[in-house]
Amino acid sequence: MTRARKLVGRVCFVGAGPGDPGLLTKRALDAIAAADHVYYDRSLPEPLMSAVREHVREGVQPRPAEGSPADVSKQLIAHAKDGDRPVRLIGGDIYPHASVVAEVRAVSDAKLPFDVVPGVGHAAATAAYAGMPPADYRALVEVDDVTTLDPATLAAAVGRGTLVLSVDSGDLGSVRDVLLAGAVDGATPVAVTGDVTGETQHTTTSTVDTFVEAALGFAGRVVLTIGTGVDEREVLGWWENRPLYGWKVLVPRTKEQAGAMSERLRAYGAIPCEVPTIAVEPPRTPAQMERAVKGLVDGRYAWIVFTSVNAVKAIRERFEEHGLDSRSFGGVKIACIGEATADAVRSFGIEPELVPSGPQSSEGLLDEFPPHDPILDLVGRVLLPRADIATEILAAGLVDRGWEIDDVTAYRTVRAAPPPADIRDAIKSGGFDAVLFTSSSTVRNLVGIAGKPHARTVVAVIGPATAETAREFGLRVDAQPEHSTVPDLVEALAEYADDLKRRLAEAPVKTRRGAKVQGPTALRFR
């Protein structure tokens, strides 16, 4: 009998890019999702590692790569010999790192199969994100050991236009000495970029003579852009020029509810912080909802009106408990108060008949809701599944239009637990640049569990009712969209930020010490 040969695993070296999770390639994500073990550099930023954890298989816990290249490669080799698939995550690209090359070589010497997935390097990412392109691709240099830099080669690259160097911040002094040794003019412009593609990417500009001092406070991997390309930053730079770049924005919603809002805020450069103010719980007694579901199946209702995503979720969960699906709605027409609620209905496989084209509110829905016609409408009843604290505007308006209403408590909203102490302190002390309120209850509950936002925090509200509640609590409303939707709310905040920057650029603002500053820097003193 032939003994079955033991299968060996495959080692995968993955370039994770400089920090922005969006720069992880599909090949990288596929490798992470298939991995039995993941070893990462400690230098990888938390947003990137958070994305990695979302893609690993259940039971796989990413671990930092500890020890020398020989130590790391021994672990990778051992896993592969056991038939597992280890992944080694490296910041930026793979081969600029001599230590990682040593790990790849060790795996190759062990006669084990391996893959190398390239990543976006720090130098290339800075050229694109900060808007400072090099003279040619040869001028993008990832430096692992500054002692290998040749003064004449660097000087020649600068002479051709622009040189981009990715180095450790602790090596900046050595790089300056090499540039000066190559007779690079000390007045040549230099930009230093830290936290490349990260939420706090920051670029400071100076010269060859002064960039070491200008970069004080920078840590980890930094990128130097040297030469004429520095002047392109104002025109081609986009990452740091987004309207909400660097703003810490408080989002008083649960993680599930805040997903779309936080994603849109990040697209504008903001750093969202999600703080639940409301917890959703089932009704105290299920009898009302049971009768409502039975009525939907039996044809008791002409319409069902959804006023929130939570209401859609509550009905859907009841349906699934009874083994029902969207077909059970039969001839019932569906109205939704806004697009977010309509999207939740569409995910159930149904297209709603009515979504207000004007204001997405109770009033906007009533403006377009048809009156009951006793001749044409054989069924004259409307199901209204809502929260236990919903206002009566919609129900009263439907009754005025001749409809009978079954106003059913589909879910209860209760005040969430207070956030951690550091979040509460940041809210009250002005640690957040802005707060977004999506309902009156988020205003009341945030103040109740964490205190009132500081006067310098920009307040954006989704609609008139929320604005009124905010003012009742003594808050200044700075931004309010024309249409009451989450995308429009974020857009309104972005427009406010753009306008604020314009005004600050035009007029000097006094700092706390009495000095005057102009432009975006003045945002810190608003």
Image (cartoon, helix red, strand yellow):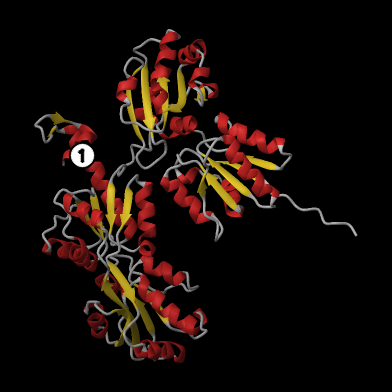
Which residue is the extreme one toward the top? Answer: 183
Q: Is residue 194 left or right of residue 450?
A: right
What x and y, as percent, mark residue 433? Answer: 23, 48
Which residue is the extreme one toward the right? Answer: 1
Relative to the observer, which residue lies in front, 169 or 47? 169
- Determine crowd level at label 1: few under 14, some 14-19, many 20+ residues with C-alpha closer than 10 A: some
What x and y, as percent, mark residue 424? Answer: 22, 56
Relative to the observer, which residue lies in front, 292 or 441? 441
Q: Is residue 52 left or right of residue 429?
A: right
Relative to the observer, which residue lies in front, 301 or 380? 301
Q: Which element type, helix, strand or loop, lies under badge 1?
A: helix
Q: How many marks?
A: 1
What x and y, as percent, mark residue 454? Answer: 15, 52
Residue at image coords 38%, 10%: 185
Which residue is the extreme one toward the left? Answer: 514
Q: Is residue 376 left or right of residue 142?
A: left
Q: Is residue 212 left or right of residue 399?
A: right
Residue at image coords 13%, 34%: 511
Residue at image coords 32%, 71%: 337
Check disc 1 and report the residue beneath it. 523
Q: Is residue 416 visible?
A: yes
Q: Is residue 307 visible?
A: no
Position of the C terminus, as image quadrant, is top left
Asked if residue 384 is positioned above or below residue 525 in the image, the reply reads below
The quadrant holding residue 441 is bottom left
What x and y, as percent, mark residue 147? Answer: 50, 18
Q: Amino acid at mark 1?
A: Leu
Asked if residue 178 is positioned above or below residue 379 in the image, the reply reads above
